[in-house]
Image (tube, rainbow, N blue to C red):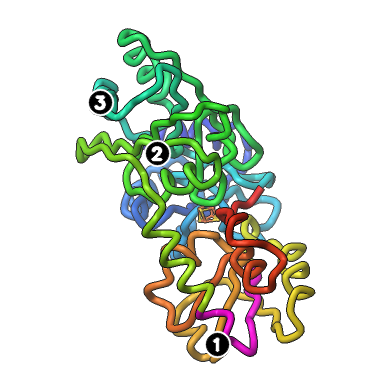
Amino acid sequence: MVFIDSILSKLAKTGKKQIVLQAPEGLMRTAVKFVPDLVSAGYTVTLSGDPCYGACDLVQDLDADTVLVHLGHAPVVQRENVIYELYQQDFNPHEILLALPYLTQTCIGLVTTVQHVHMLPRIQEVLATKGYETIVGSPTPRTPYAGQVLGCSFGGARTGATEMIYIGTGVFHALGVHLATGSRVIALDPYMKTCEEVTVRAFLTKRFSLIERAKAADQYGIIVSSKSGQERMDLAEHLLTLHPHTTLLRMKEVAADQLLNIGLPCYVNTACPRLAYDDQPRFHKPVLSPEEFEIVCGVRTWDEYAIDEIF
Ligand code: SF4
């Protein structure tokens, strides 16, 4: 839950009266409901209506008298005058028992996304009653909560454990944890009450095929994001040196229609890493990760395949 009282208490400490409220799509209706409460408390409120996928995409260019209230995400970049209000989602910690039949070790790493990190101590307690030792990774600059992973950052999963449980919905984070750490990963969805061991064969087969298609291209668009927490110009500049036929593209939203308009035969994505992986079915041309482009250019081997992360 996001608590208006918590937001009001944090706002009071800033001494500022102007707010821009920003939320991801799934929390936009919650944000709208907060506006009357904030106005009644004496604040001038503007709700950001632009799409927002993470704290990598904070509203820019606010004046010094304005506070940005960002709902649902933890900070990924340091910026002043921002209040982060998490959206914590509870579940029954005993759902972790669903994972036990899949485990082969007694020392298990635990990872999850930010909305569930507060559940990890209770999950550790449940596993301890069954004789399991658990390891929760340390915070990193991009994932400030212990045990937290993002779709672009798996530092919190580098626990040294050879077997891990990812708790959350979807399989992308679990797949990323497996590729980033080499650990065996069990993905547990505590809401659907489903559990599975993550395998990467299908993912890698698709990416291999994409790399082979990309090798036939005679021009590559290197995409660099203008979003504060996604911009990797140094990486883009490195990629530009790898091939003589590259074009630097600065984009805010990496949309399929826009890439179609630009008309290049292949793109390399240095913006949010998930775009290249999750959104490929929407793109008309191959969109590679930086590591995949390195394979195309012969400076990385297929055996050195790595998932793209922002550190
Ligand atoms: S870069 Fe992508 S995965 Fe990372 S925080 Fe932003 S939206 Fe999420």
Task: Residue type at mark 2: give it.
Answer: Tyr
Disc 2 marks which residue? 87
Residue 37 visible somewhere in the drawing: yes
Instruction: Confirm whether the magenta stretch covers residue 218.
Output: yes
The residue depicted at 20 percent of the width and 35 percent of the height is 193
> Residue 101 has which mark?
3
The residue depicted at 47 percent of the width and 26 percent of the height is 109
Left or right? Give the position of 118 relative to 263: left
Magenta range is 213-225
Disc 1 marks which residue? 265
The answer for how far apart the CA atoms under marks 1 and 2 are is: 40 Å
The response on whether ligand 1 sits within 8 Å of label 3 is no
Residue 6 in the image, given as x and y percentages of width and height = 45, 31
Q: In this rendered view, identify the residue nearer to me: 177 or 41.
A: 177
Above or below for 44 versus 226: above
The answer for how far apart the CA atoms under marks 1 and 3 are is: 47 Å
Whichever of callouts 1 and 3 sits on the residue coming sooner in the sequence is 3
Residue 141 in the image, given as x and y percentages of width and height = 66, 39
